[in-house]
Image (spheres, rainbow, N blue to C red):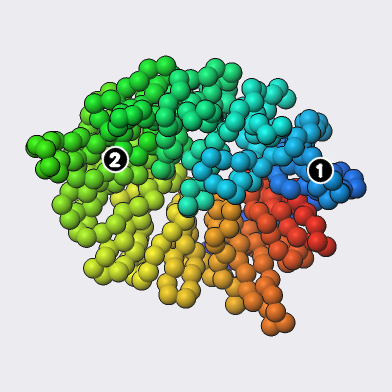
Amino acid sequence: MNKSSVADNYKILIKCVFVLFLITLSGCVEESKEKPSFIEIGKEYDAVKDFFVRDVFDVGGKPAFIVDDCQKKGNCKWFVAFDGKESKRYDTLWISTSRHSIPIEPRIYDIDGKPTFVAGRDQKWLLVFTEVEGKPYEKIEIDKDNRGDIPYQVQNIGGKPAYIVSENNKMFVVHGDKEGKRYIAVNKGSKNPCITDIKGEPVYGASEPPGKWFIVVGDKEIGKEYSPKSWSFISVNDKLGYIGSIYEFFGKGIRPNRTDAVFFDDKKGKEYDYINELTVVDDTFAYYAKKGSESFVVINETEGKHYDSADIFQLTDVGGKLAYIVKEKKENKSFVVFDNIEGKKSYEGNIGYLTDVNGKPAYIVFEKEKSFIVYDEVKIKLPKDYKIRTGDDWPPILDVNGKLVYSAYRYKKEGGTENIIIYNGIEIGKEYSGFRKITKIGNKLAFIAYKDDKNVIVIQE
């Protein structure tokens, strides 16, 4: 074989390898963009006259339904359906609280793969766990703050539910079937749940008059020498962390000097003028601090870059690395810092809803009358005339099996709106007239949609 033939054969081989590479790459792209298939679930309840599926929750990777028969005349009853079984019927699953006149919508909590919920009967409230009813109380505090967060909620503490009760003008925590000490108040958390798990024991903030503020760890009261600032506690490797305020008094009528510090594993950290957003990141913690006019984050007791006249917020664990939002007041610019690297700084306006999607930061930028999603520092293009949907009872950005999911809407010429879900860049749900909830069950996309004046629960196959 001559040299030219060998060269020609070599060129052909290179071309074949390149074509195979392109085919493989194309196949991978097509596979990742393949439109998922969906099925409607819960029909066994909707098919029964007068039954209505109100909501669905993920319990151990399986759907748990809230069902009522309020479509018929007379007194309606509510129940939870899970894994082919139905709970007892209750007067209501709407939760009446001592703080709001409007009840909180029903919820199902996952406690070690078992559906757990608060139910009402005979003007009393009780917790149902593993199909067993707990003791009835005047109030079980499931509450929302003005941001829609639910700081008072049922927590999984050592495999048993822990929750807050109000009765006879006192508040206390119930863990399993054990009632804690009565206090004038059990305080809600600002960022983290108000009850935290430390070695299987509930940890929470409580207060007693006159002006006594402290932390309860199981049956012990600690931190009385400080004022636990946010009533927001973290657990890192079964060690307790919280923000405390230190006051220096100078005399009657003179305003005391106050500094903040993080207390972790019974050790006091460095004092700053202000500390907030204590956040677990992988197997450590981070927080936002201020000293004079400078703002910065602290992680592993190391200060990050200092920003002058800036706000720092929404500290978030993204793939085991710290991400947060910086808003520079002088320039009116907002950007995201991820793993100590600053993102694009040209956004005018606000950034919100910072979310971990497959180990990369995703967030929404709000600029004047437009908004858009940025994922891994790439601006996501919306379908024509569509806008990002926010302000619902579900997160506007979801990570579903490592895929970016969000919802959008547009105004139709004939009136009304058209709503869609974007799953990994694919439009879903145009056949429905709208959505009431978007969530995930067993790491599959699920949503409640409107169809023919009924709720339809749809889940990815």
Return the residue at label 2. 299
x, y (%) of residue 151?
48, 40
Residue 369 visible somewhere in the drawing: yes
- Give the camera-side residue of 107 and 371: 107
x, y (%) of residue 450?
75, 60
Q: Residues within 10 Å of mark 2 (few under 14, many from 20)?
A: some
Q: Is residue 225 left or right of residue 40?
A: left
Return the residue at label 1. 75
What residue is drawn where x is 71% and y is 47%? 55
Residue 386, above or below 20: below
Q: Residues within 10 Å of mark 1 (few under 14, many from 20)?
A: few
The quarter of the picture where the N terminus appears is bottom right
Q: Earlier in the sequence, mark 1 or mark 2?
A: 1
What residue is drawn where x is 19% and y is 54%? 294
Which residue is situated farthest in the bottom direction here? 413
SS under mark 2: strand
The amino acid on which the numbered mark 1 sits, given as a three-letter code, is Asn
Q: Are marks 1 and 2 in contact (CB under 8 Å)?
A: no
x, y (%) of residue 261?
23, 36
Residue 265, above or below 244: above
- Give the camera-side residue of 117 and 85: 117
